[in-house]
Image (spheres, helix red, strand yellow):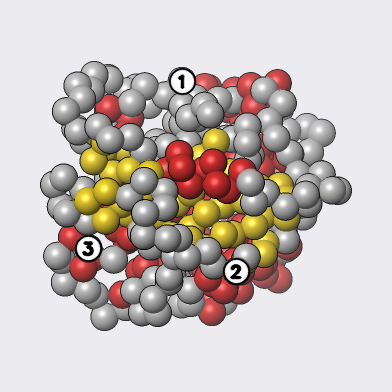
Amino acid sequence: MNRSPWAAAFLFLLGSTLALNAFEQPPEAERLRALGLLNYEPAALQRLLTPDSDFAPTRSPGAHDWLTLHEEPGQTFDDFFASKPNQPDAKHRIIYLQPIGEFPSKTSPRLSDLRAYAAAFFQLPVKVLPAVIPAADEFEPRQNPRSGDRQILTRRVLKFLQTRLPPDAFCILGVTMTDLYPDPSWNYVFGEASLRERVGIYSFARHDPAFWADPRPSDNEELILRRGCKVLAHETAHMFGLPHCIYYDCLVNGGNHLVEFDATPQHLCPVCLRKLHQSVGFDPVKRYEELSRFYRRHDWREDADWVAHQLSKVSPAKAPKK
Ligand SMILES: [Zn+2]
Ligand SMILES: [Zn+2]
């Protein structure tokens, strides 16, 4: 099975030498070229894709950030279209979430919330399958040589998931609270996906500050949910053929560590939103309305306000209340 060159985000290598890149922020002309001509897009979508001040250009990466350590060529909208990525169709349009192992309450994101978020974000039906509780020796478990944490091997889980792909699935995404490793030489990985086979596995084990022996904030459950939703949306975006974004601050930016990951926005930039829209064909206003309801329900005010501002561009009546 091929490991996607971009899907294994948040990779932490043991004993590997990483080249440092001098990432140069793409100038405005290049960002506009990446977005492509919008003339034939519907008027509302054109307004929502306008690269105004709501979309900041990519930040300059720090020494330990993704773009310093990983060369990313970027993918324009036209490149995306020409790549003929997997797309949902009438017979393959359900995103399945397959829990692997237990999801203890308080320290895990609620599966019903992950389902609701993914359904709003991708505008596709999302179903949660009954949990699979693996045997103690299943998926090549090991104790992490540094931390001693129990980990399971991603490629074994991905192989298992291939056998569980329902006929009406667009993709099946394993979710787990068990830590992962992609290869014995690696320390750990947050997630890995195989795009061709339409399977992915993501772990939320490291989203709880307690994992790092850090104090838990008072809103720890929302922090865990927020991180879970973000990683689910980011990694699933790869399933639609979106590689890491280099044009704007964007949910699909690569993230090399939790601080960088937390700093990436919860939303797609215009280039990535246009790609997802091309793939799914959703109503972008309905999508933002559903995301807005999710954010308000969870009191994610910054995201709710950001989405309300997007909606105000297509309907002044939906402008945020002052
Ligand atoms: Zn990624
Ligand atoms: Zn983007």
Q: Label 2 is placed on what type of residue?
A: Pro
**Residue name at image x 19 percent, y 21 percent:** 17
Badge 3: residue crowd in 10 Å (few <14, some 14–19, many ≥20)? few
Marks 1 and 2: CB-CB under 8 Å?
no
Which residue position holds label 1? 73
Q: Quadrant of residue 89?
A: top right
Badge 1: residue crowd in 10 Å (few <14, some 14–19, many ≥20)? few
Q: With 228 as the anchor, is 36 left or right in this view?
A: right
From this view, report whether residue 194 is shown above or below residue 172.
above
Q: Residue 219, labelled with which disc?
A: none
| Label 2: which secondary element | loop
| Label 3: which secondary element | helix
Q: Let me know if residue 315 appears in the view.
A: yes
Q: Label 3 is placed on what type of residue?
A: Phe
If you read the primary sequence from the N terminus, does the residue marked by circle 3 or circle 1 appear first?
1
Which residue position holds label 3? 211
Q: CA distance from mark 3 to mark 1?
A: 34 Å
**Residue name at image x 63 percent, y 22 percent:** 79
| Label 1: which secondary element | loop
Q: With 85 as the anchor, is 229 left or right in this view?
A: left
Q: Label 1 is placed on what type of residue?
A: Pro
Which residue position holds label 2? 130
- The yes-or-no answer for disc 3 within 8 Å of ligand 1 is no
From this view, report whether residue 163 is shown above or below residue 119.
above
From this view, report whether residue 118 is shown above or below residue 34.
below
Q: Quadrant of residue 88?
A: top right
**Residue name at image x 42 percent, y 60 percent:** 135
If you read the primary sequence from the N terminus, does the residue marked by circle 1 or circle 2 appear first?
1
Measuring from the top left, give residue 247's x and y in whole percent: 47, 32
Marks 3 and 2: CB-CB under 8 Å?
no
**Residue name at image x 37 percent, y 68 percent:** 224
Q: CA distance from mark 3 to mark 2?
A: 26 Å
